[in-house]
Amino acid sequence: MQSAMPQPQQVSANLAQRKLEQILNPAHPLCKDDVVWILEFIKKKVAEEDPQLMELSQPRLMQNFRYFADISLMLIQRRNGFDQEADRLKNWISEATYGITPPPKSSKTMSRL
């Protein structure tokens, strides 16, 4: 008999999806912890060789990496908050997580390979 309880992986995936949606929400102010969380999330997906990631073309993987690197460099170079560049940073986050998360519901059409 199967349990009605969700599997731990499902719960974790749902929590991660909700966290990502929160970070990408235009009304949500970004903080350093959000940016670090998203970088760790991406790193974990790559380390686990996530099947969704493995289905992406090499040019798309390179594009994801470029945005991951841009986010990382912005984090290193910033001394204060991300207020002034929040829209650009959220776009980079969306691009860096392309293929390992569902597309944002209210996103504009972004460059996809």
Image (cartoon, rainbow, N blue to C red):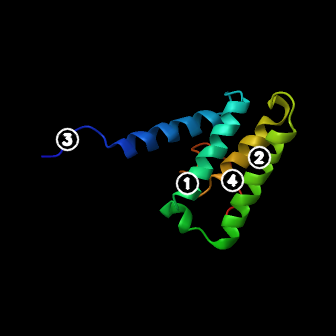
Amino acid type at mark 1: Lys
Quadrant of the rendering where the C terminus is positioned: bottom right
The amino acid type found where label 3 is placed reads: Ser
Q: Earlier in the sequence, mark 2 or mark 1?
A: 1
Image point (83%, 41%), residue name = 76
Disc 4 is placed on an element classified as helix
**Tag of residue 103:** none
Residue that protrudes farthest toward the front in the picture: 47
Give neighbour class at mark 3: few <14, some 14-19, many 20+ (Cα, 10 Å): few
**Closer to the camera in the image, 109 or 81:** 81
- Rounded to the nearest angstrom, the CA distance separating label 4 from label 2 is 10 Å
Mark 4 and mark 3 residues within 8 Å of each other at the beta carbon? no
Q: CA distance from mark 1 to mark 4?
A: 15 Å
- Residue 102 is left or right of residue 96, and the answer is left
Q: Are discs 2 and 1 less than 8 Å apart at CB?
A: no
Q: Which mark is residue 71?
A: 2
Q: How many marks?
A: 4
Give the SS element for disc 1.
helix
**Which sits in the foreground, 32 or 110?**
32
From the image, tell me which residue sits under label 4: 95
- Which numbered circle lies on residue 3? 3
Viewer-nearest of labels 4 and 2? 2
Residue named by callout 1: 45
Instruction: State the residue lying farthest toward the left.
Output: 1
